[in-house]
Amino acid sequence: MFNGDYVHGMSIFKLIGPLLILLGLTTGAAANPHSMTPLPNEELSQSLSLTNACSKVNIVEWRQDGGPNEIAKNKLNAICNKVIGDFPRFFKNKEYNVTPIENFTQSVSIIPIDNGFRNLNDIIFRFSTRSFIEYDENGDLITILGYHQRATSFIYIYNQVLIDGKLNKQFRTVFAHELFHALSYQFGIFYQHDGNKNETEEEMAQDFTEFMGYGR
């Protein structure tokens, strides 16, 4: 999970009735607004696969931010492949057993950052079961920028890949951070942590993006 200084003061949106539950749903009773994974009407008509070492990383949902485009997709691909290349080097002098990175598999949803219905900080419906929901001293929800769900091998991330046509460096850091978690779980690093595994994992993800030159 990645939370930063971006819009920390965003308040939790209020439940405004059954109309909100129906917003954006096209499959009637079969659609579960509490499903963390994308609903059928939220999925791209055809998922976008990245390439090279990330050929099994699939963008399955991309809402707003202009939607899928080649420039943004190329940036995602470059970040992902650099993460996979840097991952074993990061552990070179650490006491971890790192298995070869093969068949890395992950699904990605790129969605609006706010707490509107089915968006990244919607903790009433879509992310009601998310781990580590936190509030600031005023009782406002602390906004997250990215989230990795281990059980489903899914990354959820805010939809600002580009700013004015150029790579958003904050997005780059967040995406690399969440990819680190995904690799850590899939290839057994997480389970080798001593002590509080979650705290160690989060600190190590920040160390990794700094190692890459992306900052924390």
Image (spheres, grey):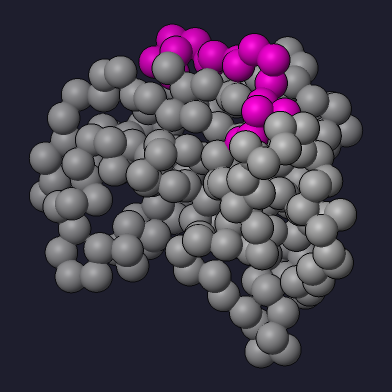
Residue at (19% x, 41% y) in the render: 188
| Quadrant of the image occupied by residue 89 | top left
Q: Nearer the viewer, residue 190 or 71?
A: 190
Q: Is residue 37 left or right of residue 164?
A: left
- Residue 193 vs 32, above or below: the answer is below
| Quadrant of the image occupied by residue 90 | top left
The magenta segment is 38-55
Residue at the limit of the structure toward the front, as seen here:
29
- Residue 69 vs 13, above or below: the answer is above
Residue 146 shows in this picture = no
Q: Nearer the viewer, residue 135 or 128?
A: 128
Q: Position of residue 78 (x, y in %)?
A: 55, 21
Residue at (75% x, 59% y) in the render: 115
Q: Position of residue 200 (x, y in %)?
A: 29, 63
Residue at the limit of the structure toward the bottom, as seen here:
137
Q: Nearer the viewer, residue 90 or 1?
A: 1
In magenta stretch: residue 204: no
Residue at (25% x, 63% y) in the render: 197
- Residue 48 vs 84, above or below: the answer is above
Residue at (37% x, 46% y) in the render: 150
Badge count: 0
Residue 200 shows in this picture = yes
Q: Is residue 15 left or right of residue 97?
A: right
In magenta stretch: residue 52: yes
Q: Position of residue 20 (x, y in %)?
A: 83, 55
Q: Is residue 132 left or right of residue 39?
A: left
Q: Is residue 110 left or right of residue 88?
A: right
- Residue 36 vs 4, above or below: the answer is above
